[in-house]
Image (cartoon, rainbow, N blue to C red):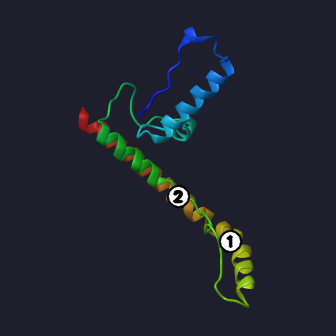
Amino acid sequence: MTHQSYILSSGPIDPTTLESEVEANLQARLSKSTQLNVKEIEEISKYPFKLFPEGFELSELETSKMRALAALSQCQLKPAASITSHRKYIGRFIVFAKKLSWPLIRLHLKDTLAGIQGFQSWTVKSVAELIVATRK
């Protein structure tokens, strides 16, 4: 891994350029790191509660397991990336019907997914509470 260095004795550095390079390097580092990335930090900061008490420490393995459990607990109903059909003549109609029906399917499954999401979030919280309780 190579690091860019700035030699201040070679002349003045444009602050805007330096700021943009630092931000780009930080974003690149955060995206490659196994630590929390910016998107995860933003999402976590929205939650009104904490899973663990202040000052509670997890090992790296426990942290990665909890992070995976929390990520897997999130469920969303997403359409297929691309809806296509291999049928030459009626394929356009099939694709149109699938795209038209997707909002209706989502509407019907919205409450079911909300219930699943609630249960899975409760499970993550319960696992965190068990970890804290076993450490006491």
Q: Mark number for residue 25?
A: none
* Left or right relative to 97: residue 124: left
The outermost residue toward the top is 9
Q: Position of residue 122 (x, y in %)?
A: 44, 49
Quadrant of the rendering where the C terminus is positioned: top left
The vertical placement of 55 against 24, above or below, is above
Q: Earlier in the sequence, mark 2 or mark 1?
A: 2
Q: For this rendering, which residue is in front, 129 or 10?
A: 10
Q: For this rendering, which residue is in front, 5 or 37?
A: 5
Q: Position of residue 40 (x, y in %)?
A: 52, 41
Residue at 50% x, 21% y is: 5
Distance (Cα) linking label 2 and label 1: 17 Å
Give the residue pinned by disc 2: 75
Residue at 67% x, 17% y is: 14
Q: For this rendering, which residue is in front, 64 or 119?
A: 64
Q: Position of residue 121 (x, y in %)?
A: 47, 50
Q: What's under tag 1, amino acid-wise?
A: Trp
Number of marks drawn: 2
Give the residue pinned by disc 1: 102
Dot 1: few (<14), some (14–19), or many (≥20) neighbours within 10 Å? some
